[in-house]
Image (cartoon, grey):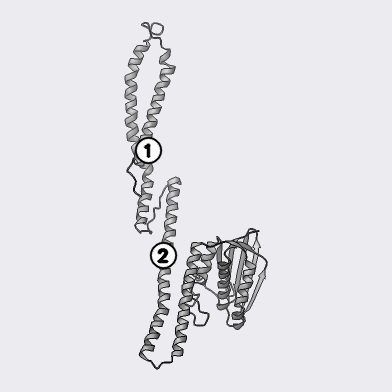
Amino acid sequence: MRRRPGLSARLKLTLSYVGFLAVAGALLLAVVWMYLLRYVPDNSQGLLGISPNRYLLVHTFAPAAAVAMAFLLVFGLVGGWILAGRMLAPLTRITAAARRAGNGSLSHRIRMKGRQDEFRELSDAFDSMLGQLESHVAEQRRFAANASHELRTPLAISRTLLDVARKDPTRDRGELIERLHAVNTRAIDLTEALLLLSRGDRGNFTRESVDLSLIAEEAAETLLPVAEQRRITLDVTGGAARTNGSPELLLRVVTNLVQNAVVHNLPVGGTVTVHTEAHGDTSVLRVENTGRRLPPELVPTLTEPFQRGTQRVRADEHAGVGLGLAIVQSIVRAHEGTLTLVPRPTGGLLVTVRLPGTP
């Protein structure tokens, strides 16, 4: 939005200093007149016959007062201009950094030195904002690159299968159809996951009262056949834990966590425990599973898109697209909650979701 040019902040501050000095000088002259000159007799003998009269004092004092006022104005202009420049120097640095950021350079930092004041606080807040923006942009670029790669893979496989079928008409069409169906299903799952992740990031959903314990039971009941197939014990414990949110999205949170806990578990004899409780004004959901030991440096990356634990790709029928925990984190953040991942000393993972509770 273009605006008409106006006075700069430095010039406005300078004029303010000059105006303050002019007013102060005028008040001083008024005080001198009211409490000194007005009591001097205005006659030819003066005060007690030995002092000059008011006429002489006024005509002697007026030129000196005019010179003093002129000096104050000039001093105010020069000194005010210098002081305003020094005061606004940090703001100039912040403006230059903002312009560089607007041109796409997010790696620049102000790093203002000196004591803590309003400009230092503004500079530190701006540096923090730039750091978050740079991290967010880098994350979005990685996400776009990974999403493009993940979407390209099933499309490339489908094209290869179609090329093979076109070059070899005698090939079994049933096998080709099954493989195309599997590849297409994976592409659809990935697309739906991306849409769900985008929906969670925007936070545009209808909120209503939800009991996490009921959702946990529903998710466990849905995934119980998968757990039984893998010989994993799935338990749901705890009590009611109510919060305000989207039942559909919160069900996806619990389902993703339980599915990850079942899939990334021991080959045989593993356990998965889902616990819900209300702790003060917070509703808590914990999903704990057994499994292999996780390196501590790996855990923070699990919520990044397209990360699949210690293996990039799984080959079984429950292979995911690497968006499970990323979707969970996005939905939890949209519900103003927190997601915590802690590796268990004996192996496996403890995932804790904390959401604002309701009575």
Quarter holding residue 134: bottom left
- Residue 95 visible from this viewpoint: yes
Write down the residue under mark 2: 138
Within 10 Å of the Cα at label 2, are there few (<14), some (14-19), or many (20+) other Cα atoms? few
Above or below, 27 relative to 114: above
Q: Position of residue 128 (x, y in %)?
A: 44, 55
Residue 7 shown left or right of residue 322 in the figure: left
Q: Which is more toward the observer, 120 or 105?
A: 105
Calculate the distance from the C-alpha at mark 2 to the C-alpha at mark 1.
41 Å
Q: Which is more toward the observer, 302 or 335?
A: 335
Above or below, 41 relative to 20: above
Quarter holding residue 150: bottom left
Q: Position of residue 203 (x, y in %)?
A: 51, 62
Write down the residue under mark 1: 13
Q: Position of residue 239 (x, y in %)?
A: 68, 67
Q: Quadrant of the C terminus?
A: bottom right
- Residue 268 visible from this viewpoint: no
Q: Secondary structure at mark 2?
A: helix
Within 10 Å of the Cα at label 1, are there few (<14), some (14-19), or many (20+) other Cα atoms? some
Q: Which is more toward the observer, 251 or 264?
A: 251
Residue 163 shown left or right of residue 224 in the figure: left
